[in-house]
Image (spheres, rainbow, N blue to C red):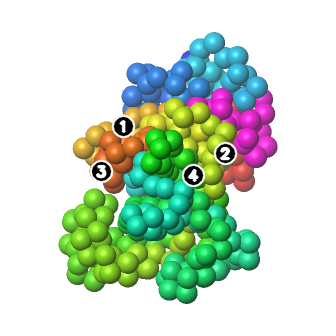
């Protein structure tokens, strides 16, 4: 389907190259999206409908209203949107994340000794507070009733913080769902990179599974290694979503397995449809929705793909570290405005 907005494809690459500001934007056609014609556009439209009403940027209200009654998903996207390749000089990188499922308890026991916490009232928002090491060494959170639940393994707790959400299986069979509430203001740092630099792992050995196994085998060294990441995540109980729905993303909407991605919201509008072309051992060409963010997700060509919940989702997510490209779909009116800006 051709629309008037897509005529700007003829001029966009030249205009983007001539622009002096970063990032650069290249307008392309739908038939330049690898695999576009065979994707399940209805699945992407379903995910888009859930969060488009929460998009904070101007210019989205019209397409969000039309999304609710659009009878043909592919036609909806092709008529109302313009694909835009946004580049800022960074190397494209796509990784995966998931919602862990971990055994735990609402009470401390001899088995469950490692708590996850809600936000301490004295922690200032938007500024840097105590680091991970300082929190653990000083015990500043202990014995204050801030514990949400207790886990059996500090490594499980660490990786739940990295993922930002989790399902905790309680001894009575119930499942407690927790989600991101806040963090201590420190930037995320990769313990994998720290372990490579220390010589503990080779460059191609530091997978999430390898790090987990090593930290569990050497708990004291693992504890010190986790201090290399000063960021510390606090949780909240999530009780208003169904069991079969994904965790809540940054837009406070449930995430969809292999349809939701985390992006840098300084580069990509939260809620926008994004065409993803991921290379690697398991190539993926699919229309996603930018419904989440992450402290390690920085740049216009950087995204984290949500793979679902549980062990298998975790295995698949951990195997992803691939290049490719991502193309944001902007409403036609915004695309025309953007073209006018880059031509000035």
Name the disc covering residue 284, or none: 1
Q: Residue at x 26, y 76 (%)?
A: 218
Numbered-mark total: 4
Q: Position of residue 202 (x, y in %)?
A: 20, 72
Query: Mark 2 falls on what kind of element?
Result: loop
- Using the rendered image of the protein, determine whether residue 324 is visible from the camera's viewpoint: no
Instruction: Please rate how many residues cluster around mark 4, counting C-alpha atoms within 10 Å: few if below 14, some from 14 to 19, many from 20.
Output: many
Per the model, the C-alpha gap separating discs 2 and 1 is: 26 Å
In front of the other: 93 or 2: 93
Q: Earlier in the sequence, mark 4 or mark 3?
A: 4
Per the model, the C-alpha gap separating discs 1 and 4 is: 29 Å
Instruction: Indicate left or right for 180 with 275 as reference.
Output: right
- Mark 2 highlights which residue? 252
Q: Position of residue 155 (x, y in %)?
A: 38, 66
Span of residues in magenta: 47-62
- The quarter in which the N terminus is drawn is top right
């Amino acid at each position: 389907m051709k629309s008037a907005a897509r005529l700007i494809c003829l001029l966009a690459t030249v205009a983007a190259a001539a622009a002096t500001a970063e990032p650069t934007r290249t307008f392309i056609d739908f038939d330049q999206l690898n695999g576009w014609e065979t994707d399940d556009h209805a699945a992407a439209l379903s995910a888009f409908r859930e969060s488009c009403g929460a998009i904070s940027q101007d210019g989205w209200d019209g397409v969000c209203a039309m999304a609710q009654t659009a009878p043909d998903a592919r036609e909806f996207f092709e008529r109302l949107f313009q694909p835009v390749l946004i580049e800022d000089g960074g190397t494209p990188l796509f990784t995966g994340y998931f919602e862990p499922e971990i055994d735990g308890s609402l009470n401390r026991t001899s088995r469950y000794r490692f708590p996850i916490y809600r936000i301490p009232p004295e922690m200032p928002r938007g500024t840097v507070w105590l680091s991970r090491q300082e929190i653990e060494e000083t015990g500043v959170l202990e014995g204050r009733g801030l514990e949400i639940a207790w886990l059996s393994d500090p490594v499980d707790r660490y990786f739940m913080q990295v993922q930002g959400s989790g399902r905790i299986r309680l001894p009575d069979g119930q499942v407690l769902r927790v989600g991101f509430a806040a963090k201590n203001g420190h930037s995320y740092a990769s313990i994998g990179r720290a372990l490579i630099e220390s010589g503990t792992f080779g460059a191609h050995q530091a997978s999430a599974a390898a790090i987990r196994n090593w930290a569990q085998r050497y708990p004291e060294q693992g504890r010190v290694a986790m201090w290399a990441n000063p960021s510390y995540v606090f949780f909240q109980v999530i009780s208003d979503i169904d069991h079969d729905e994904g965790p809540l993303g940054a837009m406070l909407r449930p995430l969809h397995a292999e349809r939701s991605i985390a992006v840098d919201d300084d580069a990509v509008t939260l809620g926008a449809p994004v065409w993803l072309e991921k290379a690697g051992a398991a190539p993926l060409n699919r229309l996603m929705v930018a419904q989440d963010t992450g402290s390690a997700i920085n740049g216009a060509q950087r995204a984290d793909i949500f793979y679902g919940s549980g062990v298998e989702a975790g295995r698949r997510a951990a195997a992803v570290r691939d290049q490719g490209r991502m193309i944001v779909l902007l409403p036609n009116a915004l695309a025309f405005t953007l073209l006018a800006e880059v031509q000035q």
